[in-house]
Amino acid sequence: MCERVTVNGEPMSEDAFAEWTSRIAADVERLDASFFEATTAVAFADLAARGVDIAVIEVGLGGRLDATNVITPLVSVVTKIALEHTDYLGPTLAGIAREKGPPNPQGPGGGV
């Protein structure tokens, strides 16, 4: 698990992983958080504690329901659109692309 969160080539320490996991355990249980949601919280806590200014964050399934959406990205890149996770993202490539793309702050038809 620790190699999933690295800063300047240094993975999160096992002690840090244990500490963050322990600190969020009650909230994970209370919220019935998924494994990905819990590990995302641990990763973000560790990155913040290590003073990271800019990070490359890989999403889970992507889309507006992804656990990584608690941050506002400077840049978003979608590398592949495929018919996967259709129960969550929709049955069509166009719908999945809309779900995975960043929200448009100017509403439908405006902005980027």
Image: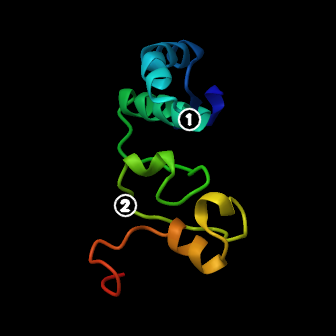
Residue 96 image offset from top left, x and y in percent:
60, 71
Q: Residue at x 34, y 82 (%)?
A: 108
Q: Amino acid at mark 1?
A: Thr
Q: Quadrant of residue 110?
A: bottom left
Q: Residue at x 49, y 45 (%)?
A: 67
**Secondary structure of the residue carrying numbered label 2:** loop
Question: Which of these two is toward me, 63 or 76?
Answer: 63
Residue 23 image offset from top left, x and y in percent:
43, 15
Indicate whether 69 appears above or below 3.
below
Pair 2/1: label in front: 2
Residue 63 image offset from top left, x and y in percent:
52, 60
Dividing the image into 4 quarters, which one contains the N terminus? Answer: top right
Do the residues bearing badges 2 and 1 touch, measured as CB atoms within 8 Å? no
Instruction: Report which residue position mark 1 lands on.
Output: 6
Few, some or many C-alpha atoms within 10 Å of disc 2 (few <14, some 14-19, many ≥20)? few
Question: Which of these two is toward me, 45 or 89?
Answer: 89
Q: Residue at x 60, y 80 (%)?
A: 94
Instruction: Report which residue position mark 2 lands on.
Output: 74
**Secondary structure of the residue carrying numbered label 1:** strand
Residue 54 in the figure: left or right of residue 84:
left
Whole-number angstrom distance, CA of label 2 to CA of label 1: 19 Å
Q: Amino acid at mark 2?
A: Leu
Indicate whether 52 appears above or below 13.
below
